Image: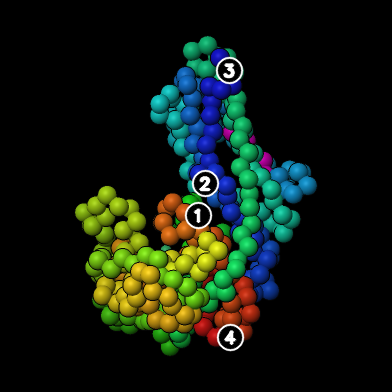
Amino acid sequence: MTEAALQIEARPSQVYVALYDRLPHPGLGTVQEFALDIGISASAPIVLTDVVWRVFDENDHVSLVRQRLGEAAMEELTRGQFGVAPGLGLVLPRCYFLEQGAQPLSRLRISVAGFEAATRVGVSASLDVPLVYPQQRAKIHLPFADGTWWAITGNDWTSPHKAEPVSWPFAYDFVRLGAEGRTFAGDGRSNLDHYSFGQPVTAPAGGKIVLVRDDMPDQAPGEALDADAIADDPTRLAGNVVVIGHGYSEFSYLAHLQAGSITVEEGQMVKRGEQVAAVGNSGHSPGPHLHYHFQEGPSLFVDRGVPVQFYNFKAVGDLVERATIPSRMIVNPA
Ligand SMILES: [Zn+2]
């Protein structure tokens, strides 16, 4: 038995860290976060005893340690499987890390230990995952012409988008608020009751339209997406989409767009502020809203999502030159 019997894989293999040192509210301290899926495979049945994560800073000092040791921890971590079966492996999904402060981080070391079930010979393995910070080039603005919008999930540590750690960990969902501070009038059972539905979606920065999908119907609010509608293409969860390439491997992904509302074609150039579609409720969407995220390429669930800062917007009435928008912030285009 050698250590090669255990193997660790990270997805993505290099992980973006979101550094929130620019938040439009003085009460929010600096934090950093990242998320990834970890896969463990073995050439013989292995019983796991330890999984340890260490985050190193740029001076190679350990800045955060998380360890899961012993039988009870392994039972919870492996959902009762305790070990790794050959040909099957073990996935530790959505491993999520949050760190206070602005000290730059350099790598995550994942260490796994256990013993071979048949011989009880100890085995271990470790993997270093590089942690990187994005250098945003495009001046991204809110993708709306006007109105008051609520970031129901935002680019921060509370977002359910972290469940998909490749393209979506830093995604936003925006809904428009009416004058009375609600998201819809009436009982909300019709898309037309929702203030978001049909609102213009504008290019957040200039660029080229690299992807359009416009064949998905709008769902009724609360209606589950039919599995047949996804067919064998999970990117259909995003409904109708427009993807804009801004250059330097920076792409804006605008999703759940209204059926029939897309006014641009693939290959077309757009200017910032130009309307490209309207807010809809297509794909896997609980109600009318705009999903927006920034990613490294045009392919959903393949290209990595990137933390994004917005330029020139208003947050709770104050003008902000450039900042991350955290979850639950109410914002307006400036
Ligand atoms: Zn979303």
- Of labels 2 and 3, earlier in sequence is 3
Residue that carries the numbered disc 1 in the rendered image? 304
The alpha-carbon separation of the residues under discs 3 and 4 comes to 62 Å
Q: Which mark is residue 247?
A: none
Name the image quarter holding residue 241.
bottom left
Residue that carries the numbered disc 2 in the rendered image? 12
Residues at discs 1 and 2 in contact (Cβ within 8 Å): yes
Q: Which mark is residue 317?
A: 4
* Residue lying farthest to the bottom in this orientation: 179
Q: Residues within 10 Å of mark 4 (few under 14, many from 20)?
A: few
Name the image quarter holding residue 25.
bottom right
Residues at discs 2 and 4 in contact (Cβ within 8 Å): no
In the image, is 189 to the left or to the right of 12? left
Q: Amino acid at mark 3?
A: Thr
Q: Quadrant of ligand 1?
A: bottom left
Quick one: SS at disc 2? loop
Residue that carries the numbered disc 3 in the rendered image? 2
The alpha-carbon separation of the residues under discs 2 and 4 comes to 38 Å
**Residue 167, horizontal then vertical, whole percent:** 47, 56
Quick one: SS at disc 3? loop
**Residue 52 belongs to magenta span:** yes
Name the front one of labels 1 and 4. 1
Q: Is residue 118 above or below residue 215?
A: above
Q: Amino acid at mark 2?
A: Pro
- Of labels 1 and 4, earlier in sequence is 1
> Where does the magenta region start and end?
51-55
The alpha-carbon separation of the residues under discs 2 and 3 comes to 27 Å
